[in-house]
Image (spheres, rainbow, N blue to C red):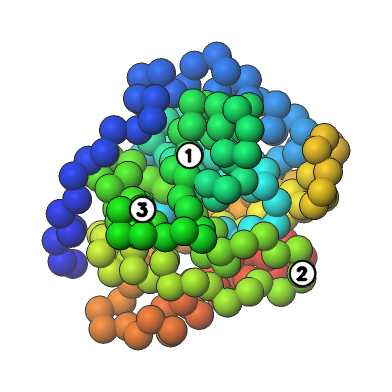
Amino acid sequence: MSEATASSPAPSARGEFHKLDFTANALALLARLLSGASTRWIDSQPDTCQRIYFANHTSHLDALVLWSALPGECRVLTRPVAAKDYWEKNAFRRFIATRVFDALLIDRDNVKLSNNPLRMMLDAIGDKYSLIVFPEGHRNTADELDEFKSGLYHLARKRPELELIPVHIDNVNRVLPRGEFLPVPLLTCITFGPPMWLEQGEPKQEFLQRARNAVRRLRDLGND
């Protein structure tokens, strides 16, 4: 396996020693209570090693619910990647995103060299952190997953030693339906799958399809 691409460790927005404070723990607990989230690990286990968790995306709560499903020692090292235009709409959202669960906010529309999402994610990972990403690139409430964007491939190519953990999030979109402000308590399920890696010489489209199929298999297991 090749060496990691050099990327300078970037300090998180708050610093790990303050991350799991009372507010963060309370928010994680609240997310689990509202979502009733059950967590399954299939052929993988919680671990503090560096990972990229990639999941389907149906709700703005996905990042929070997935993040809260991780054990505390993993949460402190895991940063969700979220849309800057949504989480910076007001001071409360900005506080929750950047000061509580330490999200990496990326600009989806006005991308320049200085705010290139791939560069920002690589800097955020450094030699310590894991990321939560949503490779569909937008919320999708349809039954079928959309095609994955190329960002996951480029992350895997730049950091081939990192474990890529597929995750299927079930039912969170009904906890906070599109256009609603207050969440509705419901039962959801977060399923973590076995790690995968980019194979040597694997073409981009084949890798992205394999990653998408990994999430679909977890969804199908939940429907059995």
Q: Label 1 neighbourhood size at 10 Å, few (<14), some (14-19), many (20+)?
A: many
Mark 3 is surrounded, within 10 Å at the Cα level, by few (under 14), some (14 to 19) or many (20 or more) other residues, namely few
> Taking 92 as reference, is 185 left or right?
right
Q: Which residue is mark 2?
A: 142
Label placed on residue 45: none
Q: Quadrant of residue 187?
A: top right
Please tell me which residue is depicted at 51% across the width and 58% down the height of the picture.
108
Q: Is residue 94 above or below residue 175?
A: above
Would residue 45 be seen by someone viewing this image from the given angle?
no
- The crowd level at tag 2 (other Cα within 10 Å; few <14, some 14-19, many 20+) is few
Tell me the distance, in whole angstroms, between the alpha carbons under discs 1 and 3.
Answer: 15 Å
Whole-percent x and y of residue 188? 75, 47
Separation of residues labelled 3 and 2 (CA atoms):
30 Å
- Nearer to me, 88 or 209: 88
Q: Give the SS element for disc 3.
A: helix
Residue at image x 66%, y 54%?
A: 169
Do the residues under discs 3 and 2 have CB atoms within 8 angstroms?
Answer: no
Q: Earlier in the sequence, mark 3 or mark 2?
A: 3
User: Mark 3 against mark 2, which lies toward the viewer?
Assistant: 3
Assess whether mark 3 and mark 1 are in contact (beta carbons under 8 angstroms).
no
The C terminus: image quadrant: bottom right
Mark before the other along the chain sequence, 1 or 2: 1
Q: Which residue is mark 3?
A: 115
Callout in the foreground (1, 3): 3
Which residue is depicted at the point 63% across and 33% down?
90
Residue kind at label 3, given as amino acid type: Asn
Residue 103 — which label?
1
> Up-down: is 176 above or below 169?
above
Check disc 2 and report its element: helix, strand or loop: loop
Residue closer to the observer: 221 or 68? 68
Where residue 13 appears, x then y in whole percent? 38, 30
Q: Nearer the viewer, residue 117 or 15?
A: 117
